[in-house]
């Protein structure tokens, strides 16, 4: 029986991540990187597809939380006979990946179940497992070593589970005051077995690193915890070496139970990276944005005609989509996909997002360097040649290409930000050419993307349908939020795209996305509506919706991609960078318009004391 998506918590080392259920089972983990094949894949199948369970045999209550300002997870399990605390952390170490799990007896005696099932290749391959002598200081005299091809997994602990039908299982008691520490380390199978790690050192190190990173801009007020947690999620999903941010650490968690809308999100979208830079700048992280900026520029480098919408973590371009027939899927939702065919799509909004983020960096005083601006000029000149091409839009429609209004607006944004680089920052470029083209694009959008009879912008030039991406028009400066044409657009979105007050991306029943089935309200779209309301002066409605969205987070502050209002549960890949980006940006907009975010009821916000704040 699958656990609800929101029952999982995230731990990570900024190379990969693990999802741990409330019941104490690691049901998803890819090693050594986010986009590596999973070694624990029970999330998309059964326990036999791989998991690591450490939990009481009978649980009456579970509470979880992160250590303040960290991604160190603490879980307290209560049973009829006692209570234990489990601490999970992933240290950041070169050439290895570790998940450390510490069990502490808090009260009484608790019987624990230990089950270790390693399966390589997304739950398909059973490794060779053997016990080896090990002089570790974890209290044991042996370790379990699982090997398959280039991958090796070493499990250490005070007592190790025994083989049982291609699993390793054990039960043991934990008494009050006792501590048991288990560690699983991944390394290359042809290198020496890695030395054991000391959990206390890494808990302290993880806390210090997170708090140091947050010190550039610590949010305050009543939304501080939510903002901080979302910022830490974004950081955790960012590869520490390359700077690429994955959209989510999972693949194929469905947008609709039993449906086909199951995608692999373990890749880096240019759009997501650009929006991450924008979100960080809004909260004063100008000094912490270079890693993302550099990834953006490396990924985008080259021939403008070969610009992709997404890349692998290291910037490579191949991510062939295929289906894993051996996995039944989350709650039977098939197909299970790895790779993503959307990589071949044309999405004209991407360059606008990139140029907007780089202009924000310039505005914040981050020095532009010659190669960076030369690349931007190259990309904009390429845009000038093919701006008339149709695309598949922000939502990666798998139907035919269209003139999507949001995409056309973002072409305008790309040119506008390029002009700002010339006019505001003294950079060199074909100012008149870009200015003339920007005006032509705007005229086109106002002629074909806006329907006077409906008093609304439309999803694309050949439809009367609306699309939640239209909520971004004032955010990117294309139109004022109080313009009657935008007000009319919001009105149509409220009438056509709201489901129990939450926002759909578009009406799937219109049939433009080339897929069967339906989907649920998209959480980043809900945060976009918060920002739109706030900018329109509907601050009370913005605040009410924002706080409702905060209530949809799980017990440790995480959000998936969508929310099923009928079932009252999260849906889609998890945790979703887009959703947490939306939260951070909406909170910044509420603060900017003067909403009561400090909790004192006076409608004023506490000023930031960081001189780099955006």
Image: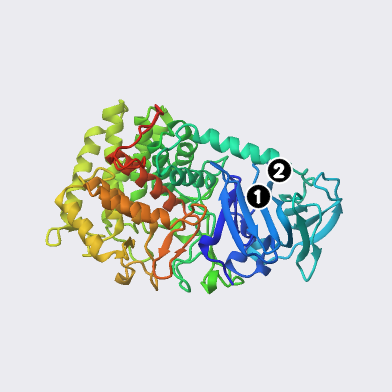
Which quadrant is home to the N terminus? bottom right
Q: Is residue 388 visible?
A: no
Q: State the residue position of label 1.
A: 87
Viewer-nearest residue: 340 or 601? 601
Viewer-nearest residue: 520 or 441? 520
**How many C-alpha atoms fall within 10 Å of the one at disc 2: few (<14), some, or many (≥20)?**
many
**How many C-alpha atoms fall within 10 Å of the one at disc 1: few (<14), some, or many (≥20)?**
many
The residue located at (57%, 46%) in the rendering is: 71
Q: Position of residue 368 (x, y in %)?
A: 40, 29
Quarter assignment of residue 417: top left
Q: Position of residue 320 (x, y in %)?
A: 52, 60
Q: State the residue position of label 2.
A: 199
Q: Could you tell me if the residues under marks 1 and 2 are in contact, i.e. CB atoms within 8 Å?
A: yes
How many numbered marks appear? Answer: 2
Question: On residue 430, which mark appears?
Answer: none
Viewer-nearest residue: 410 or 157? 157
Q: Position of residue 465 (x, y in %)?
A: 24, 64
């Amino acid at each position: 029986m699958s656990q609800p998506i929101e029952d999982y918590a995230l731990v990570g080392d900024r190379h990969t991540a693990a999802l741990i259920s409330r019941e104490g089972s690691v049901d998803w983990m890819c090693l050594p990187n986010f986009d590596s094949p999973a070694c624990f894949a029970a999330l998309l199948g059964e326990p036999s597809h791989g998991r690591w369970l450490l939990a009481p045999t009978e649980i009456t209550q579970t509470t979880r939380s992160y250590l303040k300002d960290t991604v160190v997870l603490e879980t307290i399990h209560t049973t009829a006979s006692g209570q234990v605390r489990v601490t999970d952390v992933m240290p950041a170490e070169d050439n290895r990946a570790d998940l450390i799990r510490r069990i502490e007896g808090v009260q009484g005696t608790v019987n624990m179940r230990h089950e270790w099932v390693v399966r390589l290749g997304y739950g398909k391959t059973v490794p060779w497992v053997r016990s080896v002598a090990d002089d570790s200081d974890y209290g044991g005299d042996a370790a379990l070593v699982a090997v398959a091809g280039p991958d090796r997994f070493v499990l250490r602990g005070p007592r190790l589970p025994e083989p049982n039908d291609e699993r390793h299982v054990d039960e043991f008691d934990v008494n009050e005051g006792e501590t048991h520490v288990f560690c699983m380390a991944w390394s290359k199978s042809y290198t020496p077995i890695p030395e054991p790690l000391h959990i206390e050192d890494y808990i302290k190190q993880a806390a210090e690193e997170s708090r140091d990173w947050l010190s550039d801009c610590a949010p305050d007020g009543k939304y501080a915890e939510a903002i901080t947690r979302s910022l830490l999620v974004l950081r955790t999903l960012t590869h520490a070496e390359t700077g690429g941010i994955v959209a989510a650490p999972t693949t194929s968690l469905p947008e609709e139970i039993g449906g086909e809308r199951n995608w692999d999100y373990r890749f880096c979208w240019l759009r997501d990276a650009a929006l991450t830079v924008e979100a960080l700048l809004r909260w004063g992280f100008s000094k912490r944005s270079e890693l993302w900026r550099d990834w953006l520029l490396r990924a985008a480098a080259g021939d403008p005609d070969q610009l992709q919408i997404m890349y692998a973590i290291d910037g490579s371009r191949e991510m062939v989509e295929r289906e894993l027939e051996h996995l039944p899927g989350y709650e039977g939702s098939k197909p299970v996909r790895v790779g993503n065919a959307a990589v071949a799509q044309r999405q004209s909004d991407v360059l606008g997002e990139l140029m907007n983020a780089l202009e924000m960096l310039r505005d914040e005083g981050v020095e532009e360097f010659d190669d960076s601006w030369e690349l931007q000029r190259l990309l904009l000149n390429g845009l000038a040649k093919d701006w008339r091409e149709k695309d598949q839009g922000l939502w990666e429609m798998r139907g035919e290409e269209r003139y999507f209004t949001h995409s056309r607006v973002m072409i305008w944004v790309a040119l506008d930000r390029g002009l700002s680089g010339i006019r505001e920052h003294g950079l060199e470029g074909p100012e008149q050419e870009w200015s003339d083209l920007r005006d032509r694009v705007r005229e086109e959008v106002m002629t074909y993307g806006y329907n006077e009879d409906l008093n609304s912008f439309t999803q694309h030039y050949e439809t009367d349908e609306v699309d939640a991406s239209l909520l971004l028009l004032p955010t990117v400066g294309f139109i004022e939020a109080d313009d009657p044409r935008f007000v009319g657009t919001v009105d149509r979105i409220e009438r056509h795209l709201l489901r129990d007050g939450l926002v759909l991306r578009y009406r799937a029943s219109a049939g433009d996305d080339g897929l069967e089935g339906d989907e649920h309200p998209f959480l980043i779209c809900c945060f976009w509506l918060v920002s739109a309301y706030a900018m329109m002066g509907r601050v009370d409605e913005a605040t009410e919706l924002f706080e409702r969205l905060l209530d949809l987070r799980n017990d440790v502050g995480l959000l998936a991609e969508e929310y099923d209002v009928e079932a009252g549960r999260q849906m889609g890949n998890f945790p979703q960078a887009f959703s947490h980006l939306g939260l951070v940006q909406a909170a910044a907009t509420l603060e900017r318009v003067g909403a009561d975010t400090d909790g004192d009821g006076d409608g004023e916000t506490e000023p930031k004391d960081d001189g780099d704040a955006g």
